[in-house]
Image (cartoon, rainbow, N blue to C red):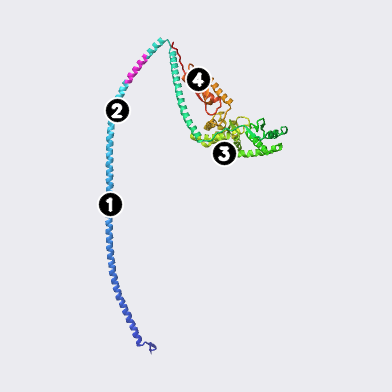
Amino acid sequence: MRAAQWDGGTVIMPEVVYVLLGLAIGVGGTLGLLALTGRKLLSQARRESEQIQKLARMEAEARAKEIEVAARQEQIRVKHELDREADAMRKQFKEQELRLSKREDTLDRKLDTLTVKERNLESLESRLSQRERAVAAREKQVEETLEQQKQKLLEISGLSVESAKELLLHRIEEECRSEAGALVQRIMEQANEEAREKSQQIILQAIQRYAAEQTCDHTVSTVAIPSDDMKGRVIGREGRNIRAFEKATGVDVIIDDTPGVVVVSCFDPVRREIARASLEKLVQDGRIHPARIEEVVAQTQKEMEENLLKLGREAAQEANFGNLPKPYIPLLGRLAYRTSYGQNVLKHSLEVAYLSQVIAEELGLDGTIARRCGLLHDIGKAMDHEQEGGHPQIGKNFLRRFNESEAVLNATEGHHGDVPATTPYTVIVMAADAISASRPGARRESLERYVKRLQDLEDLAMQFEGVRQAYAIQAGREVRVIVDAKQVDDKASAKIARDIAKKIEDTMQYPGEIKVTLIREVRSVEYAR
């Protein structure tokens, strides 16, 4: 680029001017083009805006029409609902109006009926008052007539008023007493029949559910001796062995001429069993002298104590009582060696426990309490050789130390009727005890005792006035009494039979029950000649 100096300044060359002019023209053209384009875009934007506004107005109008249509429809729906509700209310009002109208009609009819009844009642009251006056007059007339008849009767009979009244009351008393006796007899017969049927049903069910075998145990212990020489060794020189044996065991050894047998006798069954086992061991060992006897007896006693604990635990487990106090266990084991008329007392106690539970459950009582009463009712028999008194009292005193319940204590003391029963479990144990003792094969009785019991039954029945003869039959299970028909009538016969049964219960001990059959017979004998 070329430049020239002019008056101290710089002169721009024509090329630069041309460039600048070109730039200015380009800028101006660009601006013009942009202005033209802007006007076109602005015009287009206006047209689009107008279209958008037009569409918006159209949509707004359409939306407004839709809203207006929906509002009209909602208005129509609400109107229809209001019309239906109004119709329902009008219908309800009409029904209520109809019911009220009917009720008014009913009340009107009732009012008319009451009016008629009031009139009838007034008429009835009037007639009733007339009848009352007539009845009063009639009563007065009757009283006067009765008084006249009473006076005539007194004149005819020659009795005073008090005498006649006393005679009449006496006759009425006799008639009432006769009717009362017949009524009591009928009620007693019905009650006894129902009670007998129910008790037989319960007892039969209890016996059927308990099917244990019953055998009598022997109460005499014997030891087999192989030879007479062994008998001599048992006796020892001058009897020292047998004396040492009896001293160590507390039993009596009976050696007689019976071949091959030595009898061991003792009231305590446990000591008798210890003596029997010890003697068998000595006979098998062959070494028999005082020192050996003491050693064998001590060993056998220890084995017996272990055996008693084992038997007691087994009995408690069988009776489902695993939490019995420890002192009970050996006593239950001792019952296994105790017999009552040949019946094993432990087996008897287990049987009574089971039967008591069955009977109690049939009666709606607690079977567990009844089973405990039955198991422990004869526990005093394990100690009656060591203490004075009967086994019921001994057993009660022992159980009381371990805080047994009143039901168990009363059942233990009263199962033989020594004391009154305070709980129903005592009566249940008494019944179960009688069932167990009277089962066939359960017990045996000596001939002398059997005959004595039959004779006592007959003598007891003969003590009553009017009894001519008495016979004990059915092995003492029944007593038949024949009364004098001239001295005893039918009603007195029932009373005598009941009194005999009551006296048997109070004075005699027996298993099971005894039936009292009273026979009154009238015989008329005539001879034709």
Q: Nearer the viewer, residue 213 or 259?
A: 259
- Give the side of residue 39 with respect to residue 411, left or right: left
User: Is residue 4 toward the left or the right of residue 209 in the image?
Assistant: left
Question: First in sequence: mark 1 or mark 4?
Answer: 1
- According to the picture, the residue beneath numbered tag 3 turns out to be 316
Q: Residue at x 33, y 19 (%)?
A: 135
Magenta stretch: give its range. Answer: 131-145
Q: Disc 1 and disc 3: Cα gap in Å? A: 88 Å
Can residue 397 be seen here? The reply is: no
The nearer-to-camera label among 3 and 4 is 4
Q: Quadrant of the N terminus?
A: bottom left
List the residue tagged with mark 2: 118
Residue 306: give x, y in percent of width and height.
Answer: 62, 40
Of mark 3 and mark 2, the one earlier in the sequence is 2
Q: Which mark is residue 482?
A: 4
Q: Residue at x 27, y 61 (%)?
A: 62
Q: Which mark is residue 77?
A: 1
Q: Residues at badges 1 and 3 in contact (C-beta under 8 Å)? A: no
Q: Secondary structure at mark 2?
A: helix
Q: Residue at x 46, y 27 (%)?
A: 193
Whichever of labels 3 and 4 marks the residue nearer the N terminus, that label is 3
Identify the element where label 4 is drawn.
strand
Estimate how packed mark 1 is, as few (under 14), some (14 to 19) or many (20 or more) residues with alpha carbons within 10 Å: few
How crowded pointer 3 is (Cα within 10 Å; few <14, some 14-19, many 20+) is rated as: many
At label 2, counting other C-alpha atoms closer than 10 Å, the crowd grade (few under 14, some 14-19, many 20 or more) is few
Q: Amino acid at mark 2?
A: Glu
Whether pointer 3 and pointer 2 mark residues with C-beta atoms closer than 8 Å, the reply is: no
Cα distance between the residues tagged 1 and 2: 60 Å
Residue 489: percent from the left, percent from the top?
Answer: 47, 18
In the rendering, at what x and y percent does residue 328 appear?
60, 37
